[in-house]
Amino acid sequence: QPDPPIGLNWTLLNISLTGIRGDIQVSWQPPPNADVLKGWIILEYEIQYKEVNESKWKVMGPIWLTYCPVYSLRMDKEHEVRVRFRQRSFEKYSEFSEVLRVIFPQTNILEACEEGTKSNSQHPHQEIDNHLYHQLQRIRHP
């Protein structure tokens, strides 16, 4: 059975206007022993994700890239993500990667919007956009 994908990571893509849901992009690398650069092997990936307290995984795939967006995750919950792959012409999947924990930082977008509106009455949207931009820059997960 092939080794699992490695190097799982996530990046925040978007926060809903209500601050309740967030979109992330999950990325990973094929296992070192899969020679994908020469083109002899074509891998298709499957992503599974769930809230930490759920028992059933949601499944996305097949995916032929080493990254994929996952949309509309609740920001007040912790999530788990895992990835596995198979060669395109095979039925058997690899083991799952290590589970990646997704924990959103606590930010209150609505409060930020109210503060932005109060502080700059001539250009409230500019102030809100600047504040959200700086919040998103700090949220990037290593």
Image: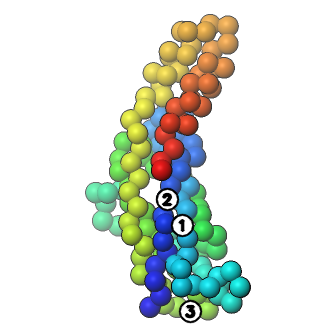
In space, the residues marked 1 and 3 are separated at their CA atoms by: 21 Å
List x then y, in percent, for residue 11.
53, 50
Tag on residue 7? Answer: none
Q: Which residue is mark 2?
A: 9
Q: Position of residue 134 (x, y in %)?
A: 56, 30
Q: Which mark is residue 28?
A: 1
- Residue 30 at x, y percent in the picture: 55, 76
Query: At label 2, which amino acid type do we have?
Result: Asn
Q: Earlier in the sequence, mark 2 or mark 3?
A: 2
Of the residues shown, which amino acid type is indicated by label 1? Trp
Q: Is residue 3 visible?
A: yes
| Label 3 crowd (10 A; few <14 / some 14-19 / many >=20) | few
Q: Give the mark, 2 or 1, whose residue is nearer the N terminus.
A: 2
Compared to residue 12, the image places residue 35 above or below, namely below
Q: Is residue 88 above or below residue 20?
A: below
Secondary structure under tag 2 reads strand
- Horizontally, residue 107 falls left or right of residue 131, namely left
Crowding near pointer 1: few (<14 within 10 Å), some, many (20+)? some
Q: Give the residue displayed 55% in from the left and 16% down from the top.
A: 116
Q: Are marks 1 and 3 in contact (CB under 8 Å)?
A: no
How far apart are the alpha carbons under marks 2 and 3? Answer: 26 Å
Name the residue carrying label 3.
90
Rendering colour mode: rainbow
Q: Position of residue 33 (x, y in %)?
A: 54, 85
**Residue in front for this viewpoint, 94 or 62:** 94
- Residue at left 43%, top 73%? 97
Q: Quadrant of residue 126?
A: top right
Q: Secondary structure at mark 3?
A: loop
Going by the numbered disc 3, the residue's amino acid type is Phe
Residue found at the far right of this picture: 39
